[in-house]
Image: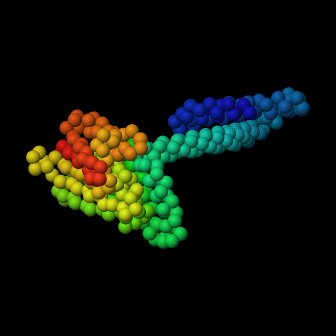
Amino acid sequence: LAVYPWVRALQRRQPTTPRALALHALAALLFGALWLAGEFVASWWWFGAEHASAMLMQTLLWRAIWGLVVYAAIATAFTALLQSRRARAAALAAAQAESALARAELAAISGKLNPHFLFNTLNTLLALIRKDAQAAEAALLRFSGMLRYVLDSKRGSADRVILADEVQFVRDYLALESLRLGARLQIDWRLDPSTLNDEIPPLTLQPLVENSVLHGVAPRVQGGSISIRSGRSAQDQGLELSVEDDGPGCDPAMVGDEPSAGRRGIGLAALQRRFAVDYEGRARLQVRTAPGAGFRVDLWIPQ
């Protein structure tokens, strides 16, 4: 038992290996000396001083070795016990950290992707798994790619992405929405190839497309179409982006972030704030809409 506090102190301080071995060697010598002293006292008590001295001298070497072996066995056992406890504590801490990270990542995903989209997609995937496993696998790959893109943007690993990456993210999003909406969702891509390597903040285009899906296509029995364009400004070579749907549109006064009935353009104010910070007011956002005239958002981003 006297060995345990010593071993615990060594483990707590975590000395370097040479130092630990030296300290253990010193402790082993002290333990061996105490071991021999204890055996001498026991022999003296039972057999007398003369007999005890003679017996100790005759067996001094192997008794000393035996004392060292006993110390090594006890120290090894206690070291294994302490390391096992430390490993369990580390595993528990890692599990708690992973759980916290998962909760944070879920919050990040929920904050960047509409919760209704997440819920609808999972339900669609569940139904698809029962009907077409191969199609479900492809859809799951798209979904996991989207989540990875969102998490990377939330962690700040990239404050800019090339337009091609954002377009792929939007394509994955629309492919998953098409599983639910089918032929009701029509997409017209008009992308200037020279703009695909231009840099934009992540999650710039997708919220605009999601707005059109939610308000311009999904509520209508006949569905609708969304046009997504990119081009180069002839005047200043800036990047021009537009997202337009042929839905019912709305009164321009109803465009805003407040989630009240009839409002459109949820997230536009947040996008404008991002532009103000990222581009110091040089980026522009314009909304064009009217009742019965669809909804269009134009962006101009300096390069």
Render colour scheme: rainbow
The vertical placement of 245 against 130, above or below, is above
What residue is drawn where x is 33% and y is 61%? 224
The vertical placement of 127 against 158, above or below, is below
Residue sitting nearer the eye, 146 or 256: 256
Seen as rendered, the residue at the extreme front is: 291
What residue is drawn where x is 37% and y is 52%? 215
- Taking the image as shown, residue 9 lies to the left or right of residue 294, namely right
Where on the picture, by quarter, is residue 36? top right
What residue is drawn where x is 25% and y is 45%? 287
Query: At which x and y percent is residue 214?
Result: 39, 53
Q: The N terminus appears in which quarter of the rendering?
A: top right
- Taking the image as shown, residue 286 lies to the left or right of residue 152, namely left
Seen as rendered, the residue at the extreme left is: 235
Q: The C terminus appears in which quarter of the rendering?
A: top left
Query: At which x and y percent is residue 244?
Result: 27, 54
Query: At which x and y percent is residue 217?
Result: 36, 57
Res 79 seen here: no
- Taking the image as shown, residue 41 lies to the left or right of residue 85, namely right
Res 126 seen here: yes
Query: At which x and y percent is residue 29?
Result: 66, 33
What residue is drawn where x is 48% and y is 62%? 124
- Taking the image as shown, residue 246 lies to the left or right of residue 75, namely left
Residue sitting nearer the eye, 102 or 270: 270
Residue sitting nearer the eye, 42 or 168: 168
Where on the picture, by quarter, is residue 140? bottom left
**Number of marks in the image?**
0
Where on the picture, by quarter, is residue 70? top right
